[in-house]
Amino acid sequence: MRKGVKRCDWTVLEETYLLTHAGRIPKREICKHLRRSARSVRDKAYHLRLQGHMVDLRCYKPRLTTCPACGCLRSKMGREGICEPCRKREQLAQIHSRIADLLHQLPQEERERYADTEAETESTPDPLPKAPNLHGLSYYQRARAKEAHEIAMEEWSARNLHRQVKAAQKRKERIEKKVKSMRLCD
């Protein structure tokens, strides 16, 4: 401390404010609200960490946006304004409706054979990403870990839906081939 500078101790309210808002709002806003210098706030956060409190002055700014179709937090939005898993679900629904239309063009015995053989073709999905352990983390670290988990879940969902779309496209192509061969025989 410099000579001649008046010392201003921290009150319990100021410490509580720092503990509750650290990581949620920028350090500059905390300093402004407490009317303390950045160095004073940084030093107090350091001393609180030494006492065992999880104080991180880095402010978390979310990178995820909410998909209007599913309401989930997503990292990437397509040109259509929806997330990749929603786009894949729509694509899968279109393929399934086309398959349903094509199945009606097949005779009954061919449809039954198709239902028996295609039921076994489903592949097992990838395992779900593990949820992060949030115990003992500061607000900033918890928010980052949750965001990373949301991104991993989005990628997992898109990857599994992509696999389903490819399988449905192959199924549709096989049925189209059967329908064309039946038309040629008639």
Image: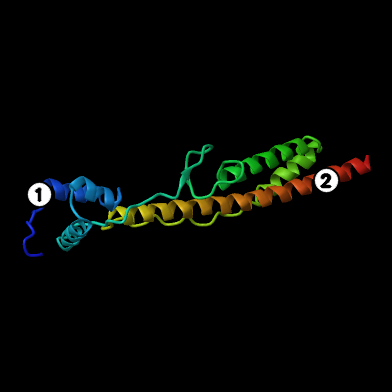
Q: Position of residue 174 (x, y in %)?
A: 78, 49
Look at the numbered disc 1 and give the secondary structure of its residue.
loop
Residue 13: name its quadrant: top left
Q: Residue at x 27, y 56 (%)?
A: 57
Identify residue for label 2: 178
Q: Note whether 146 is above or below 2 in the view shown.
A: above
| Three-letter code, disc 2 | Lys
Instruction: Specify whether 108 is left or right of 78.
Output: right
Separation (CA) of disc 2 from disc 1: 80 Å
Instruction: Specify whether 137 is left or right of 65.
Output: left
Instruction: Specify whether 126 is left or right of 5.
Output: right
Q: Nearer the viewer, mark 2 or mark 1?
A: 1
Identify residue for label 1: 11
| Three-letter code, disc 1 | Thr
Q: Residue at x 62, y 53 (%)?
A: 163
Instruction: Locate the N terminus by quadrant.
Output: bottom left
